[in-house]
Amino acid sequence: MDKIILCRTAWMKYYEGRANIDIPRSGAIYILTNKTGGEIYNFKNREGKCYGYFPNIGSPALQNLEKKYTGDHIDDVTVVFCATHPIERGMRVVGWYNNATLYNTWQNNKFSTNYHAETNFKNARLIPEDDRVFELPDTFGRNSLFYFSLHPEKQKLLTELTNYIANNGELDLEKKKTKRKLHAGNAYQQDIEKRMLVEKMAIDMAVEYYGNRYGGEINVKSVQKDNKGWDLEVITKRVKLNIEVKGLSGDILNVELTPNEYQAFNKCSPNYQLFIVNNTLSNPIIRVFKYQSKGKIWVSNDKSVLKKIIKMSAILTL
């Protein structure tokens, strides 16, 4: 992986076009004003190809990657797309193109009016939003491109990055084996035990999920007994995340929030997340919902959008 270039871009979940569930987020004036940008299609499958837009770049310095190149392009380049995490901050790797062709001038086709890089779709790797944990400190200045060839002092970071790419950006997950057994007893007792087991298993999955992404379970604290309106607090490098956990035994997503939980949920804080597990005791399906201010919607990592039904209740007494 001799030819590698970093490109700073806007943060998106999918880079398949602007949608209500995927608004580009960046400090760039154009994106702040228009809520869109040239990079919004960088990982969209275009008849087996991906075309990469480089913000504010007229001509990449191809000589920084291949000193004796000729023509208008070079091949076999690894293009790493990076963006600032919108909540936790810090420059993160969001994905890359392997075996890409990089052009020294804007290219145009029926899919893209301005692109500098292209690769086969099978060679494009987009990291799921929650798994974007690889940071690139002290890299980009004002330029949206970064060349390791000009920064020998970053050799250690380059080695870590190439190893990360070679591992396909996979998290080092250690799956726990937890016994899921109900005690013998009457149906009512087993129903209570099942609910308690589902709740505990969902909490365990959430602790494992966030621990794998934020430096271990030591950084995930249970606050279930503190009546805060959420169950876990996750300490990241820069912010604290508040996590409400819900476990369900079936495959229908339908959860209820207590008044205290709903108050926390309804604040729509960017630091609050709703972690829901379906089929908790067998073949669990995990969805993590986050609030998106544009459109005022709660969107999960699988593109699901929550619907909210407000219920009124009362306590009557003499």
Image (cartoon, rainbow, N blue to C red):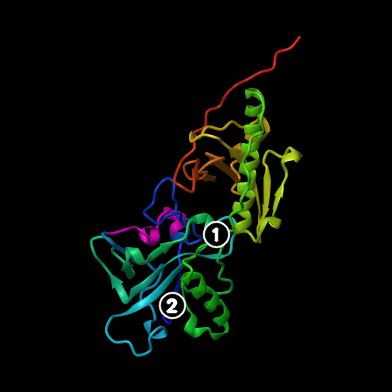
Give percent across and percent down for residue 126. Answer: 43, 61
Magenta segment range?
31-46
Q: Residue furthest toward the top? A: 318
* Residues marked 2 and 1 touching at CB (< 8 Å): no
Give percent across and percent down for residue 227. Answer: 73, 37
Which residue is painted at 41% across and 74% down in the image? 78
Which residue is painted at 47% across and 70% down in the image? 165
Q: Is residue 36 magenta?
A: yes
Give percent across and percent down for residue 7. Answer: 45, 70
Which quadrant of the view contains residue 203? top right
Residue where numbered disc 1 is placed: 85
Which residue is painted at 65% across and 31% down in the image? 258
Query: In the rendered image, which quarter contains the C terminus?
Result: top right
User: For mark 2, does the 10 Å Cα neighbourhood hold few (<14), some (14 to 19), or many (20 or more) residues?
Assistant: many
| Foreground of the two, 17 or 304 | 304
Residue where numbered disc 2 is placed: 4
Mark seen at residue 155: none
Q: Is residue 226 magenta?
A: no
Quick check: 290 above or below 266?
Answer: below
Of circles 2 and 1, which is in front?
Answer: 2
Q: Residue furthest toward the bottom? A: 68
Q: Residue furthest toward the front? A: 184
Looking at the rendered structure, the secondary structure element under dot 1 is: loop
